[in-house]
Image (cartoon, grey):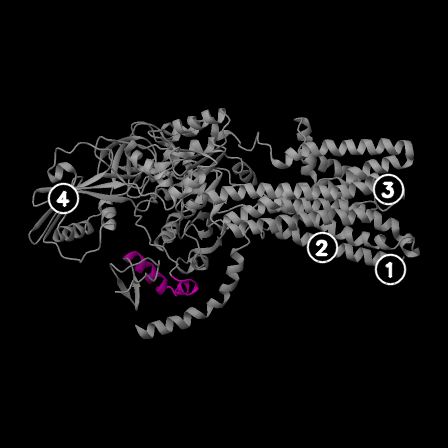
Amino acid sequence: MENTSCFHCGDDCSNHIIKLQDKSFCCNGCKTVFEIFNENDLTFYYDLHNSPGAIPKEIEEKYDFLSQENIIEKLTEFRSDTIEITTLYIPHIHCSSCIWILENLNKLNPHISDSQVNFGKKTVRVSYNSVKTNLKSVVLLLSSIGYEPYISLDDFKSDKKQINRTLIYKLGVAGFGFGNIMFLSFPEYFEVNEFWLDQYKPVFRWLMFALSLPVVFYSAQDYFISGYKGLKAKILNIDVPIALGISVLFIRSTIEIALDLGSGFFDSLAGLIFFLLIGKFFQQKTYDFLSFERDYKSYFPIAVTKINPEGYEETIQVYDIEKGNRILIRNEELIPMDGILINGKAKIDYSFVTGESQTVTKVSGDKLFAGGKQTTGVIEMEALKSVEQSYLTQLWSNDVFNKNKEDGFTTITNTISKHFTIAILSIAVIATTFWLFKDASKAINVFTAVLIIACPCAIALSAPFTFGNVLRIFGKLKFYIKNASVIEQLAQIDTIIFDKTGTITSNKNSNAEYDGDLLSASESLVLKNSLRGSNHPLSRTLYKVLDAHNIVTLDTFEEHIGQGIEARHDDVNLKIGSANFVGNPEEISVLNTAVHVSSNSVYKGKFTFYNSYRKGVSKLFNQLKKQFDLVILSGDNEGERENLKKLLPAKTKLIFNQKPEDKLEFIKYHQSEGAKILMIGDGLNDAGALAQSNVGIAVSEDVNIFSPACDAILDASKFKHLYQYIKASKSAIKIIHWSFVLSFFYNIIGLYFAVTGQLEPVVAAILMPLSSISIVVFTTIATTLLGRKLK
Amino acid sequence: MSVIYILLTVSVIIGVAFFIVFLVAVKSGQYDDGYTPSVRMLFEDELVKPKTKQSTNTKTD
């Protein structure tokens, strides 16, 4: 049979097809969404994009907290008696169909007056009539059509982020000034001593002066501020020579036109500032839909259900949970604090915390840690600690989370700027002294000319354009970097530390190896079929690993919760499950997870589960081993040690049983010994290590959903290319070095004019933009070639 | 008064006018989301289409 994919979500639905109007669906959820759209004339959704949908999740009472007044207050950005406006983050937004359907919400709920999508940020801003409908029903509507909003503790902040548009304003002002000054200065470039021109000269010049004022005092103010700060901290950063150049340009030009000595350099001045700001703008590539600053708050729910001693349920904010409170956790809900399981079957998915996707079964009386997600049914637990004091969340009280990594890191541009500034000042002084003796009238001219022409515009531009471009190239290859300085730090790495679970192992599949007597054909047939009927995660995994068999109907099938499955077909009676359940009590406890099988009460053998490592891990480590120290830092037990030893190069250090704090301390210790560390992790338990390391990269299966605070997010499918990315960062540094050489070359030409006292405005106006533009062209071409090599 | 003053005034006024338009555009948030409007623009045609689609659907039912 041909594989059919779901009309709604595109998933393979060959196992179980639901047909409606010649269309196939993989589940009832998808069908329901289609029906909703069909009834409301919204099937255009499917014309825009093939299978754009997501399977709606069961939600039931999950959003009850949204009817609470103080929570609505925090989540809405505007509230009046009748209208409320809220912005919701929806991770599933991914194509034009999504935009279309979300902007047509009013057809599904007439009380929604307006909804607007921001595709880059993956948000939808909904305005609705709060009398006729409410926040909860809007969220439920969204969830029912497969666009479940992501509401977390992070949304609970009182202050909304303000969008910073200053750079665009500054760029606009500089561009406006630059363009108009260029027009006005053009006549004087070519016609000297022409009658009409002489007549209007003052008007043109003072107009240029007026236009340059906002450019210098508004657009360029950051350079003055940063240069001043640098001097105060006794650092000659790149902004010092820039600020010096700008002030000299402005003062000299003003004096020139005031005393009618010449036309000034207003054109070069405005051009310089304009180009510098473009560089800044270019480097400011941000991934709106990603967040590099996430902590546990982004994953924790806002509210949970508390069971009062009197027995009734009440929704309370998680911060209000106190020790001893009884909490109800529903299916798919996150456990917000440490506690003890009291009632119900707990199957906890700790993948947020550890990266391990295999669920853990807990029984009444077991301790539950914050950060796990309940995956079946409802459980009741008693809180042992408040949210902030839980085992996981305590990690965030560590100092690393308040440190700014960029402080204390000298960028390549600032390193060069130190030497550059000293060199330029010496040249200026020497040249001036020389002219003082030769022709004193020219001395001040030469002094200012040197500072003007040496203004390190080209140097200041090479790093932003190179890094900006590399950032974009990496982004296209699904390696998302927080900012340019991360690339520089990445190029200096000498030690790489990997987390194990979820980082070098893949979440999606694990391997199982059979150990024991061979199963007969009929036994494997029953095995496969009984696993098919079980929803236990180990069964699902094993089912995928085993060879395909015909589908038969089992005579009996019984699932013993927490123990195993018993199934019978014809004359085969199979028991699958824990060692005790299948009747093999001699089993010595091993570190690996195993599923045992017995047939007709005879013990057959066991399937041992091994982590399945990502493709190319071994190759990647072998590439890396020549240049880097490699360490595996795992929170798990040593069960995988032998496997890892086989897989990885011999010099890789393997360290197990590491708590989140241990990982952080390990990195701190090695940094104190001078190591530059790249940490690659994925779960919240790596958050401390990611923050402490020089560069922290989070590996993520789905970049939209989950990643702890880090410097860069790497899509899991690109994990094997890590070495190429590091190599590319090193090449980027090389490109910058070459463009420095190129800009020095321009500076030498410029300095020749300056030192010999023949710097005309027109020379400056040609040389300065020319050097800037050629640097931009050079870095762009070089990085594009670099990007080609990466693909 | 020479014509050049008039021309200069006009050119500066036009320049400033466009600059103000730019500021207004930035302030109203037009540069915050550079992608969605480009897609939204193409949805205008859709207003007629679902009607016809719906009628064919009901026929097949």
CA gap between label 1 and label 4 equals 104 Å
User: In whole angstroms, how far apart are the C-alphas of marks 3 and 2?
Assistant: 30 Å
Question: Which of the two marks, 4 or 3, is nearer to us in this view?
Answer: 4
**Quadrant of image for the N terminus of chain A:** bottom left
**Would residue A165 be visible to someone looking at this image?**
no
Residue A54 placed where, x, y %? 36, 55
**Mark 3 to mark 1: distance in Å?**
27 Å
- Can you tell which mark lies on residue B3? 1
Nearer mark to the viewer, of 2 and 4: 4
Check disc 3 and give the amino acid type.
Glu
From mark 2 to mark 4, how far is it between C-alphas? Answer: 86 Å
Q: Secondary structure at mark 1?
A: helix
Image: magenta residue range? A28-50
The residue wearing badge 2 is B17
Circle 4 is placed at which residue position? A517
| Badges 2 and 4, same chain | no
